[in-house]
Image: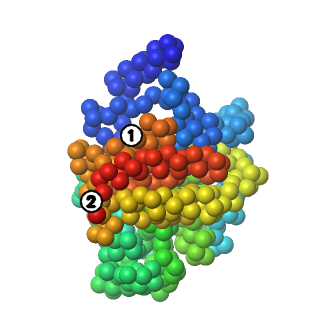
Amino acid sequence: EVIGAAAEAEIRADDRAYVLHSWSAQAAIDPLPIAGAEGSYFWDYTGKRYLDFSSQLVNMNIGYQHPRLVEAIKEQAERLCMISPAFANDVRGKAARLIVERATPNMDKVFFTNGGAEANENAVRMARLHTGRHKVLAAYRSYHGATAGAIALTGDPRRWASEPGTPGIVRYWGPYLYRSAFHATTEAEESERAVQHLRDLIEVEGAQTIAAIVLETVVGTNGILVPPAGYLAGVRELCDQHGIVMIADEVMSGFGRCGEWFAIQHWGVEPDLITFAKGVNSGYVPLGGVVMSQAIAATFNERAYPGGLTYSGHPLACASAVASIEIFEDEGILEHARMLGTDVIGPGLRELAERHPSVGEVRGLGVFWALELVTDRQSRTPLVPFNAAGDAAAPMNAFAAACKDRGLWPFTHFNRTHVVPPCTTTADEARAGLAILDEALTVADGYYVG
Ligand code: PLP
């Protein structure tokens, strides 16, 4: 289509000339110009539509261009776009109340940020001030954001270029039975040994030096690692024993992704701090924050909280969070997300695993799933090596291309494809996406040698 082609050429030219894209060698990428989006689909300027199994960066929980959410943002824009954090504001207060009311019962207040990294920065600051200690235990196979402190917490290769980074971060292994760091053979063993590993670390590091243990309730980009029964409770118990703050990073796992407001509610555990962003308003306007317990909030009653942001509690962002939470409830989106996991995506992926030898493991819950692709089920050799780039990543690139050719936008990371569509995706749309995955997996099977 002529108009589309002309528009696309201009967008590409400006993008290539002036935009520096995240995490990429600029010469190696060719960003696709996007013309629009609705529900679970987005489309390019040629009119090609993609069913989104990525939710962008796993943030589009409510789906694209939800009319009521767009309307709420318009209304707020007309009423009041911005007022500084020093003032009280109706939608800021209401967003904080709605979030606290839906968090674990121990929670008290919200500190708003612009996104997930800043939420983690502030959570660590709160934990250090609350405890008067400085060390933070952070997991391998984690992502916590790209600002100085958050990238230092991050346990994946994205941290390497920012090293040595901030001092005082001690790394631990979390549970991951399929590739157990503890040589465990059952979920129960994995859980027990992962907790024991933390207990040992605390002993040798000195409990009185440790401010916080940070974890992703369900590890997101690094593999959709669902914690085995007892693990989160075990971490909670260690934190209680030693006066350590438990920080649950729910930037990716919260707000419906795991079928709950906060994923940790699935396990009935109360952390001291929860960080959130993404799904709180699906990123229609940048927003994140820290939900804090009564005990931590009380630390800053008489003593100033030494942190702030010009846009903390931005009215446009907060109005969109209020509207998003109300829409979630009116439309039963949490229930729908749970149903997608138990009735459609979970069973659908297990069925794919039966037919495709390259599927080494299926794991997840809600609308938060991963297929781990391997060249050999016995040895569990990953389809591509850890952190593969260039030619070494070719098998995963070929798989992703097969998805995109057929109109499915996948979320791939290392040797995995994640199935993380909007929480509002219909059962039929999810099935259509699974059917495309079925075809694309034959490409992965082509590399199978087991
Ligand atoms: N924490 C987790 C678990 C994330 O997945 C992300 C982003 O992917 C972040 C933190 C960082 O959030 P942001 O990119 O909004 O700074």
Report the residue at 72% width, 40% height from top: 68
- Count the marks: how many? 2
Q: Residues within 10 Å of mark 2 (few under 14, many from 20)?
A: few
Q: Is residue 232 above or below residue 441?
A: below
Q: Is residue 256 above or below residue 266?
A: above
Q: Are marks 1 and 2 in contact (CB under 8 Å)?
A: no
Q: Residue furthest front?
A: 355
> Which of these two is toward me, 8 or 232?
8
Q: Which residue is mark 1?
A: 401
> Which of these two is toward me, 47 or 194?
47
Report the residue at 55% width, 58% height from top: 348
Q: Which residue is mark 2?
A: 449
The nearer-to-camera label among 1 and 2 is: 2
> Which of these two is toward me, 180 or 72?
180
Task: Locate the C terminus by quadrant.
Answer: bottom left
Report the residue at 44% width, 42% height from top: 403
Where is residue 280? Give x, y as percent.
60, 52
Where is residue 58? Give x, y as percent.
51, 50
State left or right for residue 79 relative to residue 408.
Answer: right
Where is residue 155? Give x, y as percent.
33, 62
The coloring applied to the image is rainbow
Residue type pointed to by label 1: Ala
Report the residue at 60% width, 42% height from top: 40
Q: Please indicate, yes or no, whether residue 156 appears anywhere in the rendered image.
A: no
Q: Is the CB atom of the residue marked by disc 1 within 8 angstroms of ligand 1's nearest atom?
A: no
> Which of these two is toward me, 402 or 411?
402
State left or right for residue 240 relative to residue 340.
Answer: left
Q: CA distance from mark 1 to mark 2?
A: 21 Å
Q: Please indicate, yes or no, whether residue 433 appears anywhere in the rendered image.
A: yes
Residue type pointed to by label 2: Val
Where is residue 300? Give x, y as percent.
56, 66
Q: Label 1: state its secondary structure.
A: helix
